[in-house]
Image (cartoon, rainbow, N blue to C red):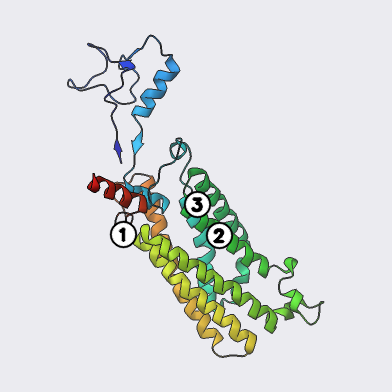
Amino acid sequence: MSYEAAQNNESLQPPTHGGNRTNGSSPLEKDFSNGYDLHHNMDEGEALKRIQTAGSISISPELFEKLYLSPQNKVSGDLRKTFGNPTPLCLVGFLLSLTPLSCDLMGWRGAGGSGAASTGAYFFFGGLLMILGAIGEWILGNTFPFVVFGSFGAFWLTFGATLQPFYNAYGAYSPDPSIPGEGLATTGFNASFAFFLLFMGLLCFIYFICALRTNVVFVLIFILLVPSFGCLAGAYWHLAMDPKSTIVTPLLIAAGAMTFVIDMLGWYLFFGILLASLDFPFSLPVGDLSRMIKGGSEKARDKGEHSA
C-alpha cells in the first residue's frame, strides 16, 4: 500500500518560502498547515477536496484481490474509500455456520441431527451476515463476491428454513399431519432435498472456474465444496431408497471431513484479510492468481499495444 503524491496540481500554488517542510523536501501530503495558497477562482472546499484526492491510497492488484476476493476492477466514485470492506463479515457468517455443521456431520462428541441444533446460526450468521455483506459487495461494485456470498446467504436461509417446523418442508411429506417429523424419513422428502444439494454442487463448480482468477485458498474451498455437496446429495438419495442404508453414515462423515478442511482454509483466509485490513507488519500468503490468468480486457490491451 503506497501513497501517491500530487505532483502537477496547477490550481494549488505552494509557497516559495516558509511552510511545513522537512529537510528541504516537498510539503507533506494531507498536511494543511503547509501554506498552500488558494487559486483566486477556487473556494476552500474545492482546494481541500483536491488535497485529499492527492493523498489517496492506491492498492496493488495483489492486495486488492486478497481483501475483496476478486480481481481489481475500476468503478466510479470513491465508495471503497468511504465504506468498510464487507468480505470478512461474509466469511464470518459462512464459517460460524459451516464449522459446527462439519462437526455435526462427522458425529463428534455425539453430535448429529443434520445440524438442527445450529438452526439459529444458519439464519443469523449464515443468512443475515452473508446477505448484508453481499449487499456491501454490490455497493462497492465487486460482482463475483457479491454473487458468491449472496447465493450462500440464501443457501443458509434455505437450510435453516428446511429444518424449521414452521415452514413445513418435511411435514408436508408426513403420512400423519399431526406428526410432521415422520416426513424426514420419507422417500419424497429425501430424494427432493438431494436435488437441491446436487445443484449447489454445480453452482460451486462454476464458482471454482471463476475463482481461478482470485487466489489459491479460494480455489481450494470451491474444489472441496463440489464433492462435499455430492456426498450430501448421495446420502439423502440413499436415505430415500432405504432409511437403514449403511452407506449414509460414511457419506455424511466424508462430507463433514471435506467441509472441515474448507473451514480451516476459510479461517486462514479470514485471518489473512483482517491482517491486511489492519496493515499488520506481517501477512499470510493466499497464493494470488489474479495476475497469472489475464483478463480479456488486459489481453486485448496488450494485443493492441503490440500491434501498434
- Amino acid at dot 1: Gly
Q: Residue furthest left?
A: 23
Q: Secondary structure at mark 3?
A: helix
Image x and y of residue 190, in percent: 65, 80
Q: Closer to us: mark 3 or mark 1?
A: 1
Q: Is residue 187 visible?
A: yes
Q: Position of residue 17 (x, y in %)?
A: 22, 11
Residue at image location 43% in from the left, 14% down from the top: 43
Residue 5: image tag: none
Disc assigned to residue 89: 3
Please tell me which residue is depicted at 74% across the width and 78% down the height of the picture.
173
Image mark for residue 151: 2
Q: Which part of the image, by quadrant, shows the C terminus?
A: top left
Q: Earlier in the sequence, mark 1 or mark 2?
A: 2
The reply to whether dot 2 and dot 3 touch (C-beta < 8 Å) is no
The residue identified by callout 1 is: 287
The image position of residue 243, as x and y in percent, is: 64, 88
Left or right of 25 on screen, residue 225: right
Nearest-to-viewer mark from 2 and 3: 2
